[in-house]
Amino acid sequence: KARDPTPVEELSPADVFIAVKTTKKYHHTRLDLLLDTWISTNMLQVIRKTHMINTNCSAAHSRQALSCKMAVEYLHQWFCHVDDDNYVNIRPLVKLLSHYSHAHDVYIGRPSLDRPLEATERFGDSHTRPVRFWFATGGAGFCVSRGLALKMSPWASGGNFMTTADRIRLPDDCTVGYIIETLLGVGLIRSPLFHSHLENLQLVSPTQIHHQVTLSYGTFDSKRNIINVRGALSLDEDPTSLHCLSECLCAKLSLLCVF
Ligand code: UDP
Ligand code: MN
C-alpha cells in the first residue's frame, strides 16, 4: 500500500526518544564515535531539555517518583531503539515518523529474516503453543509510537519485559516483535531505510546514504562491511567510515546533523 506523501503530523527531533543500547566494554570504542558524529551538539540539547522536565519528579527512589519518570518518558511521541554500532540520521528519521500518527499503533523497522520467526510460547508449568511473528532486527534500529508503547506496558515496562522474554526465550528484539505482533496483534511496518551490518552495506547507493534512517558497520562473511562513502579520512583513520560520513556531510553538504 502506498504511503501518503504528505506528513500527518508536525514532528521535531525533541518528540523522538532514542535509546542507544550499549554496555560498558563498548563505551570507549563505540559510544565515543556516536558522540563525535550523530549525537551532535543539537542532539545533546534535546537530551538536556528532557532532563529539565525530569527534575520536576521527586528525587526519591519511591515507586511514585519512578512512575513520574516513566510518565515523562511517555511525553515523547515516538520511542526508537538502536544499537551502539548504529548511525542515526535524525532528519530522515523524523521525516519518516511524521508520515504516521503517534496515537496509532506503529511498529516500524527492518526484519532480518525473510519469513516470520517460529517460536514456542510457554505459559504455566507445561503449557506451550507455537507462535509465528515478524520482528524488526535490533541491529538496524526500530521505532514504536507512543500509542503502541502504552499498550505494550503490561508486558514491557519495568520487570515485565524479563518475564515476557522468559516466555519465548529469545533475544530482546524478538521479544519486542512477540509482544507487538503476537500479544497485541499489530503488524510490523517494513522500512528499507533501516540498515544493520547483517546486510551488505556497500549496496546502499552513495547518493542515497543521507536519506537512510540508520546505518551501521561491522563484518560480513569475515570481511569489513561499511558504507561506501569517500571523505577526508582514510580507512585507517576511520575504519567504520561513519566519522567520515558525518564530517563529509556536515561540513561539505550541510545535510546531516542539521535540525
Ligand atoms: N551488547 C550488550 N551487552 C553485551 C554485548 C552487547 O548490551 O554483553 C549490546 C551492544 O552494545 C550492542 C548490541 O548489544 O548495542 C549488539 O551487540 P554487537 O553489535 O556486539 O553484536 P551483533 O551486532 O553481532 O549482534
Ligand atoms: Mn552489531
Image (cartoon, helix red, strand yellow):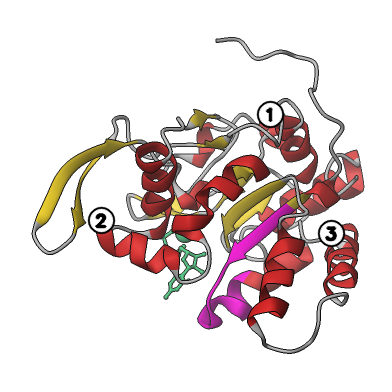
The quadrant of the picture occupied by the N terminus is top right
Seen in the picture, residue 205 relative to 118 is either above or below; the reply is above
Residue at disc 3, CB closer than 8 Å to ligand 1:
no
Left or right of 152? Residue 29 is right
Bounds of the magenta span? 17-30
Residue 225 visible in image: no
Q: Are marks 3 and 2 in contact (CB under 8 Å)?
A: no
The alpha-carbon separation of the residues under discs 3 and 2 comes to 36 Å
List x then y, in percent, for residue 16.
Answer: 75, 49
Does dot 2 land on a helix, a strand or a loop? helix
Of the pair 85 and 137, the residue shown nearer to us: 137
Q: Amino acid at mark 2?
A: Ile
Does dot 3 land on a helix, a strand or a loop? helix
Left or right of 9? Residue 60 is left
Query: What residue occupies the far bottom of the structure in this picture?
Result: 60
Q: Earlier in the sequence, mark 1 or mark 3?
A: 3
List x then y, in percent, for residue 234.
Answer: 68, 58
List x then y, in percent, for residue 255.
Answer: 86, 39
Q: Amino acid at mark 3?
A: Met
Q: Crowdedness of circle 2 by 10 Å Cα count: few (<14), some, many (20+)? A: some
Q: Earlier in the sequence, mark 2 or mark 1?
A: 2
According to the picture, the residue beneath numbered tag 2 turns out to be: 168
Residue depicted at 68% across the width and 29% down the height: 208
According to the picture, the residue beneath numbered tag 1 turns out to be: 208
Task: State yes or no: residue 24 in magenta.
Answer: yes
According to the picture, the residue beneath numbered tag 3 turns out to be: 43
Of the pair 187 and 2, the residue shown nearer to us: 187
